[in-house]
Amino acid sequence: MRKLLWVVFFSVFLASCGGGGNSNSGAGQTSETPAPEPEESQPEESQSGGKQESIVIISDSIGTGATASYDFGSSIQGRTSLTVINRSISGQTTAQGAPQVAGFLQQFDPKFIVVLLGTNDALQNKSASGAVNTLRSMAQLALDNGTIPIIGTLPPIYSSNSANDIAASISGGLFGISGARIARVRQALGPSDMSPDGIHPNNSGQSKIGAVFANNLYD
């Protein structure tokens, strides 16, 4: 009888403790803590604090380096860490270059805009005062955008006295453009800096033009 009671007691004890290897109680399992959601990466703030560190050039065939092995934009690039973007088009006048300014300012938002236009105006016997007024409007667009305009006086034109006179008049009028920096290109070039056509600078001339513009980057 005592042995029977002991067997019953032991059976009850096992049941109350969840004994046995087939228990479905989940004993011994641990609840897993959900992994935290990955944080979204935030875009880095611009470190420039303003204009893009670039220079946009608007010029004619002088800017494309016609008759030379390189252009004055390359000469500028060799003298600055800024990115030079040359958008010169052969044959264009001031009136043809002016409509491009707004688009370039919007596209590149440059720190500087370099303009060397007016030689074709002179060669086509156009009004010097009209060319200066057009260049003034280009400079104002740049200023309104917070971009610094640098306008070059025109290289001498040795192939035509009348065209050279107009180029000289345009060059003189540039100094009346408020807010623009004037690069004295004309004063830096001589006959030895020009190609045989008397219009386009040679390698020496292109290098000097680039140096004159580069000197006006940080006035």
Image (spheres, helix red, strand yellow):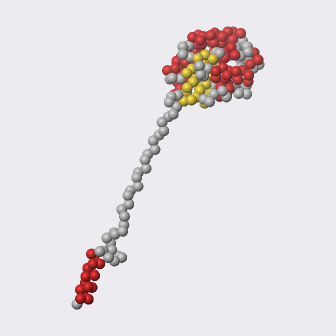
> Residue 92 appears at what percent x and percent y?
63, 21
Percent position of residue 45, x then y: 48, 36
Seen in the image, is 28 located left or right of residue 150?
A: left
Please provide percent x and percent y for residue 160: 72, 12
| Residue at image coords 66%, 20% | 212
Res 207 quadrant in image: top right
Whether residue 103 can be seen here: no
**In the image, what residue occupies the spot 25% across and 84% down?**
8
Quarter of the view holding residue 193: top right
Quadrant showing the N terminus: bottom left
Q: Residue furthest bottom?
A: 1
Towards the viewer: 198 or 14: 14
Identify the residue at horizontal 70%, vertical 14% (top origin): 157
Closer to the camera in the image, 198 or 39:
39
Residue drawn at (25%, 82%) of the image:
9
Quarter holding the C terminus is: top right
Question: Which of 96 and 25 lies nearest the eye of the viewer?
Answer: 25
**To which quarter of the image does residue 88 belong?**
top right
Residue 63: image x %, image y %?
66, 24
